[in-house]
Image: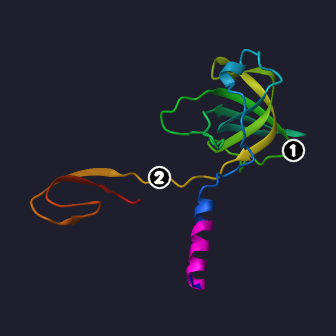
Amino acid sequence: MTKRHLAFWTFMISATSLAGCATVTPVSGTFPNITPLAAQSGNFNGQQVRWGGKIIETQPEAQQTCFTVLGEPLRNSGRPRSEEGEAHIGRFEACAPGFYDPMLYRPDREVTFIGMITGTEHHNVGQFSYTYPRLEASTVYLWPIEPPRPQVEQQVFVGTGFGFYPGWYGPGWGYWPRGRW
């Protein structure tokens, strides 16, 4: 085996090995399956949880910053599943020591917290009194903004001969996605 082949196979094995590694974030790990809706009862005080969702409001105070969050189910990585039509899992309030800039931690940004449930508070949402579970956060992770996914249209066509179409070729019926990938 030549040095060139050896270098090629070393690179291929390294690339394959790295491709199998999972991404580890500061909010990775396993946590009890307690949702903010379940924590409204006050029965889970003192439990360490991982909650996330979309920021509704960020309120800096003298020694801490408190976040009002619309909770969403989390992926295995801890990132909120913010998909259209996805059911939320309740609102919650998370407070963390220090200053978090409201311009960075602005509404609709995805965030994940790790912390301890310390009780509940009542706040109005419009005219409705809502019970917010309170989380003393030890970890606050603001997720990077994902680029928007392109809209893909399905277009049906009838072919009478051979030709090449993006994603399909040959006679008869077929379809191909149209749009940017």
Disc 1 is placed on an element classified as loop
Looking at the image, which residue sits at the far left?
160
Residue with the mark numbered 1: 98
Q: Is residue 103 left or right of residue 16?
A: right
Report if the CB atoms under discs 1 and 2 are less than 8 Å apart: no
**Where residue 160 appears, x then y in whole percent?**
9, 59
From the image, give the main secondary structure of the stretch colored magenta: helix
Q: Residue at x 55, y 80 (%)?
A: 5
Name the residue type under label 2.
Answer: Arg
- In 3D space, how far apart are the residues under numbered discs 1 and 2 (Cα atoms)? 35 Å
Disc 2 is placed on an element classified as loop
Give the mark, 1 or 2, whose residue is nearer the N terminus: 1
Residue 102 is inside the magenta segment: no
Looking at the image, which residue sits at the far right?
63
Residue 10 image label: none
Q: Nearer the viewer, residue 99 or 11?
A: 11
